[in-house]
Amino acid sequence: MPEGGYGWVVVASCSMIMFFAVGSFYSWGVMQAQLAAESIAQSSTLAFIGSLGVSLVSFTAIVMGRLIRWMGARKAGFLSCFLMGVGQILSSASSRNVGGLFFTNGIIVGLGTSMSFMVCSTLPSQYFKRKRGLANGAVFGAAGIGGAVLSVAQQTLLNRVGVAWTFRIIGFSVIALTFPACCFIKERMRRSTATIEWSLFSDPKFLLLAIGSAVGTFPLLVPPFFLPLYANSLGLSASLGSVLLAVFNISSALGRVSFGALCDLCGPITSLCFALILSALSLLAIWPVSSSLVPLIVFTILNGFGNGGFFSTIPSVVAHIYGPVRVTTVFSMVLTGWAAGYLMGSPVAGWLLDAYGGSGAGIAAYRPAMYYAGSMSVGSTGFILGVRALTTKRKLFTFA
């Protein structure tokens, strides 16, 4: 099996696509805060728009896997990027209409993101084995960088040209920058058909991985969706809130690359456990006491790092346990299980915030949402430790 070569070109192409595909949702918090400030809807409703788009990555995973096999990765890449760009442009016409935003930014952009995610998250595994974790980490790291750049860019655009033109400019940028990248996408081997492999439901490792990772998705979008709003509750400016979100995404990018490389050193399952533990500690021990800027920055960096590690290690875990030939099928099934966490994770946090007085009630109103998110990370860690125990016969805390 080759190690690199044209694979690094594929990694670069997938990285550009993921820059926008995942980065746009990880910068949604900036747009959410602006729309909330303009009284378009409550925070929980606006969080639902972002989470709906992300949840389609899970709801349509198996269908997208089949479409990619039928169309080929390159054509699927063009179609996915077109949907992402057009969805943002159409959102400009719905900037004062919540229902319209659910359709354009939730469904259309979400479908494009789903197909992009399936193309880019599994393709590097065809070109790498020994450096698979690093390759996946680079692709997912670009998503974190995208979230950072888009967070600051969106806030700047919102201040200068307003919501509608911000959507338009982002949409045209997606098409202009991702279409050239799609030209270099190339599959090394024919993908297995994404389907439901029923025999996996009798495999304890798969069940623990599917349940554990599904539980782990509930807290993932809570910090990026609510950081700008939380910063505002501390009396910080909207621009500083967008900078904090950018710091989160940069840390997420570093976490994706670092944990991807860690997979190659101490094993992907161990790396995933470390990422979940870091997320849980930051949510339970640091965010609840972040009543000023300095501890909030510490939380932002640590949680972003663990958050990014979750995403970059999962494909490597699947490939490690089931091999590159079955990775499309198994990853699609695991990804489908993330639907509830993606769809409901951040809205539940929003409902908890509203139930305790809303963003205007001060930082104490956020603590129930923080504890909810942290407890889900702890639960996820327990399931993944179970996977690790079943995968290796060595002691639980030896590298595997």
Image (spheres, rainbow, N blue to C red):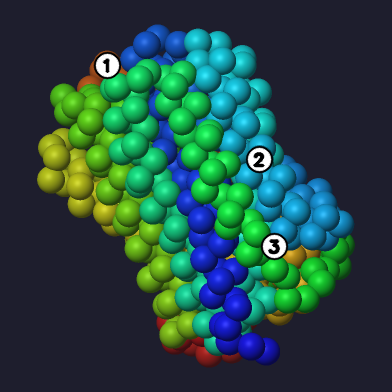
Disc sitting over residue 341 in the figure: none
Say which residue label 3 marks.
331
Q: CA distance from mark 1 to mark 2?
A: 39 Å
Residue 199 higher or lower than 339, as above or below: below
The residue depicted at 52 percent of the width and 20 percent of the height is 92
- Element type at mark 3: helix
**Nearer to the camera, 26 or 284:** 26
For the question of whether residue 383 can be seen, the reply is: no
Q: CA distance from mark 2 to mark 3?
A: 24 Å
The amino acid beneath tag 3 is Phe
For the question of whether residue 32 can be seen, the reply is: yes
Say which residue label 1 marks.
360
Q: CA distance from mark 1 to mark 3?
A: 41 Å
Say which residue label 2 marks.
82
- Element type at mark 1: helix
Residue 8 higher or lower than 286, as above or below: below
Q: Nearer the viewer, mark 1 or mark 2?
A: 2
Tell which circle, 1 or 2, labels the residue nearer the N-terminal end: 2
**Nearer to the camera, 129 or 215:** 129
Residue 232 higher or lower than 145, as above or below: above
Q: Find residue 110 and report its horizontal and vertical position in percent.
A: 63, 37
The residue depicted at 56 percent of the width and 83 percent of the height is 4
Look at the numbered discs 1 and 2 and tell me whether their residues touch, using CB distance below 8 Å: no
Q: Is residue 46 left or right of residue 90?
A: left
Residue density around tag 2, few if under 14, some if 14–19, many if 20 or more, within 10 Å = many
Tell which circle, 2 or 3, labels the residue nearer the N-terminal end: 2
- Element type at mark 2: helix
